[in-house]
Image: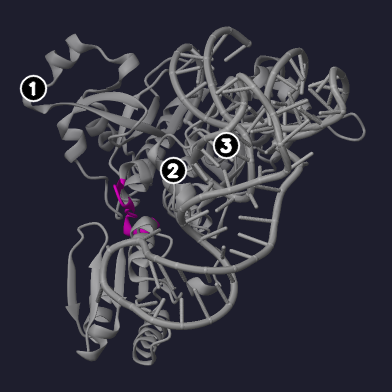
Amino acid sequence: MRLSRYFLPILREDPKEAEIVSHRLMLRAGMIRQSSAGIYSWLPLGLRVLRKIEQIVREEQDRAGAIELLMPTIQPAGIWRESGRYEEYGKEMLRITDRHDREMLYGPTNEELITGIFRDSVKSYRDLPCNLYHIQWKFRDEIRPRFGVMRGREFLMKDAYSFDLTPEDARRSYHKMFVAYLRTYERMGLKSIPMAADTGPIGGDLSHEFIVLADTGESQVHCDRDLIERSAPGEDTDYSADLGSVVQQWTGKYAATDDKHDPARFERQVAKENRVTARGIEVGHIFYFGTKYTKTMNCKVQGPDGSMVTLHCGSYGIGVSRLAGAIIEACHDEHGIIWPDPVAPYRVGLVNLKAGDRDTDAACESLYSQLGNAGVDVLYDDKDERAGAKFAAMDLLGLPWQIIVGPRGVKLGEVEIKRRDTGERDSMTPEAALARILEH
RNA sequence: CGGGGCAUGGCGCAGCCUGGUAGCGCACCUGCUUUGGGAGCAGGGGGUCGCAAGUUCGAAUCUUGCUGCCCCGACCA
């Protein structure tokens, strides 16, 4: 993409409404614009990031055996009355009336909808287990939206729903999602830690929040260093096996958010040198809720012995739009964003230091087309601006690689290549620069 | 929902106290000079001063009401 033909409204100064760093940088880098409190438009650059995140989430859900579908944003009130949550949910639910005075709502979550679909379609235990997910916009009318995209009212969320015949089977389904989550965050270049969460009225040990570590995170967390150093299960994980032992490796170590922190237990359970207190952001939540909705909504299948069995369910959420903010919180410096390669909107920023100079233009055009042909996403700054402004903008955008092409270097047959994360810069021939990027 | 604050061009702000018909920096347009870490000079375009009433000869400025947004707290993927 040529910057001269792109839509990328960069702000030089900080908008005053943005307090936290990810919000500031997303506005400045032209990723988002606020529409109203807690509701944002995603501009082209922001949308690319959102799509990258979404795609990683999707791939890991698919790998774990979940099946994608798409449910609507607007739901009828009726099914929420069936589950009893229409009255229960309160003002967080945005209620709407259509032209026929029918009561509708903008979905804050989809348990009712999916349970309804499943109930009407699946009648036999032979179709179990089943895990269905979608990636869809949700709306929760938060009392006070804040932190930009991190706590908006409208947000993009991946939510999966598992259906099983027995609690034991449901546990296996839960474990799959647990592992998929570890993999998902790691692929985005984040360090995530599962922490035991409130299980609500069901009880048990099957609810975890996934916290991403970031110095500017909203909540304080305490955990065993082993959890931070451990890497996620590999691509070769066999999701058809029971992953209980894998999950056990993670849940066996101490990890708690501040509100559930037990200092005495922390000291007893974790050796002094392994005690870590850090800040984090919640980016996912998984839980088993048993028959909560299947019972009230009468969702049953026929079991092997011919009897009708109420299904056991869990739900598994990932805040996709929130992750865009969370990643920036975890990955930035004083100059701007530092995108981890897998979620970067473009891999390479090609900087023409003297647009209009014949040799410099030619060198850039050549690199631009070669990178394009090699399937590398490039943002080419071909605008007629001063070098300083271009450097500042490129650092703000945080693309992993910069190739800097100026008349001075071109005379010597060289371009400069820079890694945004380490700041390392090297001069080399354009061919070598190309090779360096392609080998990564 | 309790407490605090803000609303003036795309962004950041001054002007308001002490009413007289809107200004600064950045960004944008034109020209010239510049050109490797947010250039200089000259010229230019762009504003229902959040909305509505009121006071007044006259309101960005004073009064009242409303709306929007931000921050702190309780709540949350």
Q: Residue at x 33, y 59 (%)?
A: A395
Q: Amino acid at mark 2?
A: Arg
Seen at 49% across and 44% down, the residue is A320
Residue A339 in magenta stretch: yes
Instruction: Kindly identify which chain the residue marked by label 1 belongs to.
Output: A
Question: Of the numbered discs in the image, which one, if any, rests on residue A291?
Answer: none
- Residue A1 visible in the displayed image: no
Q: Give the chain of mark 3.
A: A
Q: Is residue A173 left or right of residue B46?
A: left
- Residue A348 lies, in percent from the top left, at 35, 69
- The residue tagged 1 is A271
Q: Is B3 drawn above or below residue B37 in the view shown?
A: above
Q: Badge 3 local density, few (<14 within 10 Å), some, or many (20+)?
A: some
Q: Secondary structure at mark 3?
A: helix
Residue A226, above or below A183: above
- For the image, the number of numbered tags is 3
Q: Of marks 3 and 2, which one's residue comes earlier in the chain?
A: 2
Q: Which span is picked out in magenta?
A: A331-343
Residue identified by numbered label 3 = A125
Seen at 31% across and 52% down, the residue is A335
In the rendered structure, which disc, 3 or 1, sits on the residue that comes first in sequence? 3
Relative to residue A344, is residue A289 drawn left or right?
right
Q: Position of residue A209 (x, y in %)?
A: 39, 29
Question: Is residue A392 or residue A262 the one in the foreground?
Answer: A392
Residue picked out by circle 2: A24
